[in-house]
Amino acid sequence: MKHPLFCLVTVAALSAPALVAAQPLDCPQPAPVFAEADANTFDLAKLAQTVGTTDLGGDSLHAVAEQIRADYPDASDADVADIMITAFCTYLNTDAPADHRSEANVNAFEQQAYIAVFGGPPPESYPRQGWLYGN
């Protein structure tokens, strides 16, 4: 006698890690400085695509950070780092290839974003260190 339920349970159990990996991350909302800026309309989807497809090996994220600073001069370094990481989180939830969600890739992005914004590791006073994968 065949047990179709056994097959279904086996398939569900084997695919569970893939389903968990596909769960949306809980991305924080952009800081008020980005919503309150009258001169610019903040486009999180565009920034998400920009940071998500940026080469982590060069100065590309530094250029993104500098552009954010130019567009939003009232944004603090922490605001700039947060919005870049929020945008990357948004990218991971929408357009990212599966390998971009790996812990190694996420950690690499965070470290490069910190270097681009803070010039190295974030100061101890920065509260969101490593928050993305602790999600």
Image: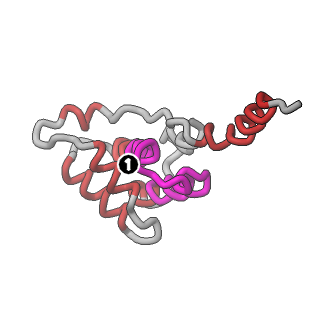
Residue 89 image-quadrant placement: top left
The residue nearer to you, when weighing 33 against 29, is: 29
Disc 1 marks which amino acid?
Met
Residue furthest to the right: 1
Residue 14 location (% of width, % of height) = 74, 41
Q: Left of 116 or right of it: where is 2?
A: right
Residue 81 appears in the rendering: no
Which quarter of the rendered picture does the C terminus lie within?
Answer: top right
At 83% from the left and 30% from the top, the residue drawn is 3
Residue 74 image-quadrant placement: top left
- Which segment did they paint magenta? 85-113
Q: Left of 122 or right of it: where is 5?
A: right
Q: Left of 3 or right of it: where is 47?
A: left
Which quarter of the rendered picture does the N terminus lie within?
Answer: top right
At 39% from the left and 60% from the top, the residue drawn is 53
Residues packed near mark 1 inside 10 Å, few (<14), some (14 to 19) or many (20 plus): many
Residue 2 location (% of width, % of height) = 85, 32
At 41% from the left and 49% from the top, the residue drawn is 95
Q: Is residue 128 above or below residue 88?
A: above
Q: How is the image coloured?
A: secondary structure
**Does the magenta segment cover residue 59?**
no
